[in-house]
Image: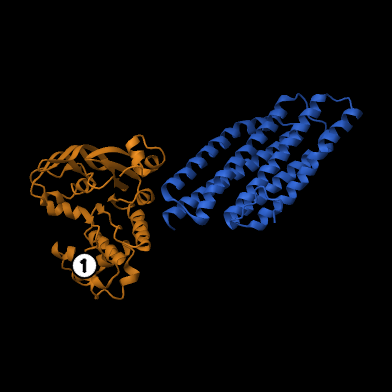
Amino acid sequence: MNKIETRNVNLHYGDFHALKGINMSIVENSVTALIGPSGCGKSTYLRLFNRMNDLISNVRIEGDILVEGKDIYERGVDVDELRKKVGMVFQKPNPFPKTIFENVAYGLRVNGIKNSAFIEERVERSLQQSALWEEVKDKLKKSAFELSGGQQQRLCIARALAIEPTVLLMDEPASALDPLSTAKIEELIYELKNKYTIIIVTHNMQQAGRVSDRTAFFYMGELIESDETKVIFTNPKNVRTQNYITGRFG
Amino acid sequence: MSHLDTELKYLKDELLVMFKLVQLQVAKCKSALMNFDTDLAKEILVNEKRVNAMELKIDRDCENILALFNPVAIDLRFVLATLKINSNLERIGDNAEGIARYVMDVHEAFPTEFTTAYAIGEMADIALSMLEDAIIALENEDTTAARKIFLKDDALDTINKRATRTTMELMLKKNAMPLHFLNLLSIVRKLERVGDQTKNISEEIIFYIEAKVLRHAQNTD
């Protein structure tokens, strides 16, 4: 089943045509990697699905963008509800200036959940899902800033998971991390896809190869090729894709 | 288990299935030959398609692992060794198919006196035990088991070298069709090749586990 679909999507930042006629489907419970050179539209495309582009003043979007079969740009769509369903993790870990516990509990509290036992259970579960629980279970009251970069990023993932999204958007989630932390994040992504639909923007093609089921190559706002990752990296159909993944340009 | 570990385990499991399939083909060859069982020979020919299909699948899986995971060290050696082991197993399968075709093509059983003179049964047993050693070596990452194969291959080589003299002696004494001798000589050569290919496999297993290259080496210690 397709979790997300875009049909003939065009996006302009003022006069700049950033996304050109994008048609793509994203299957449920899979990891899709978006690759391409800087400025090609990968992050712009990613931000469509939780309407983060709405925050940019001169943006104009055309086409259909469906999540679970519903057009998320239709009049009357509750953007807050959408952003609960479609979580996001950013390149630079951005924990709140709160304790580890409160970072994860925050989303639950602002959604009106007051039951302490429920919050505690959900915080523990989220931290376990993000493979951080064993490292922080004895210091939940400590500041999130006392964690390492890799731990902070896993905390941000736990924070996103706490409100039970169905889709996770990850914009270069490991690019600011050391190799060991990167490996942990990648293993986490591989495990999370059993429950979530994940879209990841990455500049690291080896990472795309390791974690994703499908890979989409963008170039100058166009979707050049989208296929199973093993096909993209063994026998891409488009010569531009081949040139990019072999490092001949970009 | 990491994603790469899962893929490598799956590849190893596939390779072991291929190993056992080819071992069974060789075992059936011995039976088909010694009992002149043409039905069994037909089975070998049919199963050869499975061997070929598995070879292609394993090659593809190796390609995917190299492209997607950039393995290094022992993981890289394992994938490289698998490519070569796979190819050798497929050739063993071809040899088994070739022997099965001889059984299909002759109209009567090879006389026992001849198969004994050529030590066909003994060769087949040695080849099968070499394959068994290779399976154990791969399953348990046991290079001692892999090294046992080299001596056994020497035994096969000795029998093979005797085969030409055996042919001359039998032709002088017996009035059997020359075709029997030619076919039996070819079967001996094929069984000897199975031994060589199994020895190649053991060298690749040692390479994967110990990072030692034994190909073209004088001593295989």
The percent coordinates of residue A207 (x first, y second) are 36, 52
| Residue at (53% x, 46% y) in the render | B14
Residue A1 visible in the snapshot:
no
The percent coordinates of residue B120 (x first, y second) are 78, 38
Q: Quadrant of residue A11?
A: top left
Q: Given the image, on which type of amino acid does mark 1 rest?
A: Asn
Question: Quadrant of the image for the C terminus of chain A?
Answer: top left
Q: Determine the residue located farthest toward the right in the rendered image.
A: B173
Is residue B150 shown left or right of residue B113? left
* Towards the viewer: B112 or B78: B78
- The colour mode here is by chain
Q: Is residue B8 above or below residue A127?
A: above
Chain A: colour as depicted: orange
* Towards the viewer: A188 or A14: A14
Q: Chain of mark 1?
A: A
- Where is mark 1, residue-wise? A103
Chain B: colour as depicted: blue
Secondary structure beneath label 1: helix
Is residue B95 shown left or right of residue B6? right
